[in-house]
Amino acid sequence: MVLEINKLSKSFGGIVALKEVSLEVSRGEVLAVIGPNGSGKTTLLNLITGVYVPTSGEITLGGKRIDGHNSAEICTSGIARTFQNIRLFKQLSVLDNVLIGFNHAFKSSLANVLGKGRRFREEEKTFREDAAKLLEVVGLRGKENVVAQSLPYAQQRLLEIARALATQPQVLLLDEPAAGMNSEEIAHLIQLIKTLRQTGLTIILIEHIMDLVRGVTDRVIVLSYGVKIAAGSFEEIERNQEVIEAYLGK
Ligand code: ADP
């Protein structure tokens, strides 16, 4: 298993946001986490990425405990994410946004990348080539010099994925990647996720758009009030009466 989560819980004061949730994902697997608003999906991502410290439970990546580590350490360990509300350096070019992702793998400061310090200059050619390859993979080839904020919304989401990939993760966490996309854009995203899976990348996604969940996931887990109420293939989940009542039927 690449990522294993064992009885993970998180409380905020009196609110139990996540209660003894366990899951595991293997290499090249795409897992979706679904459930109604407030069911604990974002809390789960924030625990995996070190934004929050668990109240109890364990998270292991490649057999090593990572719970309690901070976000930077977790990114270095090999977990990258995108955000529900796109977080890009909006004034910078598409290429620079991806180069900042490489910054992490390269373990230099942001200033070094932007100021193009000596070590960065030595590596710059390789980084630029790698960044261009990533932009090609996500479908943004030719947009290198466009300012990030002037990209259409769906392309900004793809850029966030390219930047996350630049950190060379083993696990990619996507927080509502299809939000705001039309059906054509969702079809493109489905193809992209399939391509990434073939490279052995493990993907966990939170999503409300069932076309995407149906199109790409190997397995789905369903949260309701912080508890895992079901797990299985999308077809199994779709027929599960408890899931229909808690979420899908609404
Ligand atoms: P989802 O992503 O499924 O909509 P969340 O993980 O955001 O659900 O929220 C789960 C529960 O935890 C909700 O009741 C929410 O109000 C609560 N919660 C989430 N984050 C915090 C926080 N930082 N402080 C207090 N309560 C929180």
Image (tube, rainbow, N blue to C red):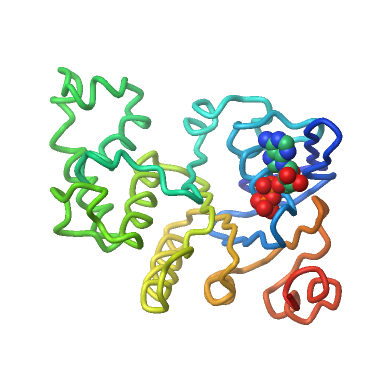
Spot occupied by residue 231 in the image (x, y as percentages of width and height) = 77, 65
Q: Is residue 81 visible?
A: yes
State the count of labels.
0
* Left or right: 179 as drawn, with respect to 111: right
Q: Quadrant of residue 93?
A: top left
Spot occupied by residue 180 in the image (x, y as percentages of width and height) = 44, 65
Where's the C terminus, which quadrant?
Answer: bottom right
Spot occupied by residue 187 in the image (x, y as percentages of width and height) = 41, 76
Q: Quadrant of residue 62?
A: top right
63 up-or-down from 183: above or below: above
Camera-nearest residue between 59 and 46: 46
102 up-or-down from 2: above or below: above
The residue lying furthest to the top in this view is 118
Please give the name of the residue rendered at 27% of the width and 63% of the height, measured from the top-left corner: 139
* Left or right: 170 as drawn, with respect to 62: left
* Left or right: 192 as drawn, with respect to 80: left
Please give the name of the residue rendered at 78% of the width and 37% of the height, measured from the top-left corner: 10
Q: Is residue 59 visible?
A: no
Camera-nearest residue between 31 and 224: 224
